[in-house]
Image: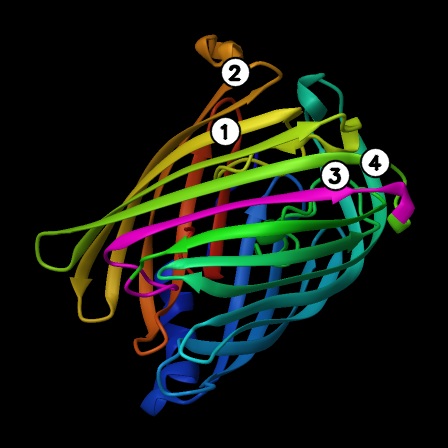
């Protein structure tokens, strides 16, 4: 079981906020902290630059991150999230690398302790263009040599394109529906994305199989500045090896520690406005790992999650939020995070 990091989260947010909020500077510099069963205690830093590529587009961001954990693991990378031509074009891309020492207490529910050491190399790219009001169509490419559990290594960036870890190269299509008032800190609207990745030996990978992913998000404002957020998300595989299976993605669990061919979860969160830029989150969800969806009627395939945290709005114009959260799952699963951005 991971233990709650003992430095108060409020103290870290207060320490960080003067560095990055003065007069809405385009520069961003924040500490990142997490404590979970995979990498133990992990601390690092993320920096970036924010700007609008044109007056009618969302804020674009180019940044870099680096972190180190007490398991002697380290990762680093660069990333970008770009919007231009009045949001008609969107591009997300990144490169990551590092050394990962995983320590699984109960690997795949076997009761066995497993330790692995891997050198991480990964790259992803996604471009989409507006083809009809609110609808985007695009393509994506993924390449990685990393073992199971890579989604969270780049602070969630890899998860956006479905990288789950294996020697692989894949291509796919992306369909998006965008109706949110703010892509980074939504207060109302809906968002939907459906995408696939075709991993093929002919592209230089070790295996040929297919992955389909779907993600629906709904946001409802209530009260004085509060928001109810809902996410329904799934990942389904066809002919995948075990290294390409779907992983549990709820807060409080170790990515890669629980796997099956398919995965679905429902996650709900109340985002409460406390005072000016300060807020709080209370969240709960349940995930299901399964071969057939009918198995989700049985408790052994279900994984509950819940927790709470505090948030600080670093860049109001760009919608960038820093948050500290503690999440608890079933058995001994729990984790603590200080990171940039809303969970969804």
Instruction: From the viewer's side, name the closer residue of 313 and 246.
Output: 246
State the image coordinates of residue 76 (x, y, percent, origin top left). Answer: 71, 66
Residue position for label 4:
208
* Residue at the spot of label 3: 148
Please state if 99 lies on the left or on the right of 40 as rendered: right
**Which is more N-terminal, label 1 or label 2?**
1
Name the residue carrying label 1: 264
Circle 2/circle 1 CB separation < 8 Å: yes
Which numbered circle lies on residue 293?
2
Q: How much space separates mark 1 and mark 3, taking CA atoms?
A: 18 Å
State which mark lies toward you, 1 or 4. Answer: 4
User: Magenta segment: does it hold 195?
Assistant: yes
Q: Is residue 194 visible?
A: yes
For disc 4, the neighbor class at 10 Å (few under 14, some 14 to 19, many from 20) is some
Disc 4 versus disc 2: nearer the observer: 4
- Mark 2 residue crowding within 10 angstroms, few (<14) / some (14–19) / many (20+): few
**Residue 165 appears in the figure:** no
Q: How is the image coloured?
A: rainbow
Query: Per the image, is 87 magenta?
Result: no
Disc 4 vs disc 3: which is toward the camera?
A: 4
N-terminal-most mark, 3 or 2: 3
- Callout 4: SS: loop
Say what secondary structure mark 2 lies in.
helix
Q: Is residue 124 above or below residue 110?
A: below
Instruction: Pick out the residue farthest to the left.
Output: 223
The mark closer to the camera, 1 or 3, is 1
Of mark 1 and mark 3, the one earlier in the sequence is: 3
**Image quadrant of residue 92?**
bottom right
Q: Which residues are magenta?
A: 181-202
User: Which quadrant does the N terminus fall into?
Assistant: top right
The residues bearing labels 1 and 4 have C-alpha atoms spaced at a distance of 23 Å
Q: CA distance from mark 2 to mark 1?
A: 9 Å
């Amino acid at each position: 079981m991971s233990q709650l990091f003992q430095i108060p989260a409020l103290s870290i947010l207060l320490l960080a906020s003067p560095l990055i909020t003065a007069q809405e500077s385009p520069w961003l510099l924040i500490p990142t902290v997490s404590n979970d069963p995979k990498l133990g205690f992990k601390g690092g830093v993320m920096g970036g630059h924010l700007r609008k590529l044109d007056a009618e587009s969302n804020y674009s961001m180019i940044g870099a991150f680096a972190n180190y954990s007490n398991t002697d693991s380290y990762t680093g990378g660069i990333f970008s999230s770009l919007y231009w031509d009045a949001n008609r074009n969107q591009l997300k891309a990144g490169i990551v690398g590092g050394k990962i020492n995983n320590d699984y207490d109960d690997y795949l529910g076997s009761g066995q302790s497993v330790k692995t050491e891997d050198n991480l190399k990964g790259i992803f790219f996604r471009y989409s263009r507006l083809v009809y009001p609110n609808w985007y169509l695009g393509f994506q490419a993924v390449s990685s040599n990393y073992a199971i559990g890579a989604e969270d290594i780049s602070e969630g960036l890899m998860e956006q394109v479905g990288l789950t870890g294996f020697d692989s190269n894949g291509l796919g299509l992306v369909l998006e529906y965008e109706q949110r008032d703010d892509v980074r800190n939504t207060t109302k609207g809906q968002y939907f994305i459906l995408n696939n990745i075709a991993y093929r030996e002919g592209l230089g990978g070790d295996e040929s199989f297919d992955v389909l992913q779907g993600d629906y998000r709904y946001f409802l404002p209530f009260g004085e500045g509060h928001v109810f957020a809902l996410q329904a998300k799934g990942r389904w595989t066809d002919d995948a090896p075990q290294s390409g299976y779907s992983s549990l993605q709820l807060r409080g669990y170790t990515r890669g520690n629980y796997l099956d061919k398919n995965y679905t979860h429902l996650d709900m969160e109340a985002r409460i406005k406390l005072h000016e830029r300060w807020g709080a989150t209370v969240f709960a969800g349940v995930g299901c790992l399964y071969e057939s969806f009918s198995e989700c009627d049985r408790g052994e395939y279900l994984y509950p999650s819940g927790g709470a945290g505090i948030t600080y709005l670093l860049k109001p114009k760009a919608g960038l939020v820093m948050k500290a959260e503690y999440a608890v799952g079933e058995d001994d699963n729990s984790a603590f995070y200080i990171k940039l951005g809303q969970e969804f």
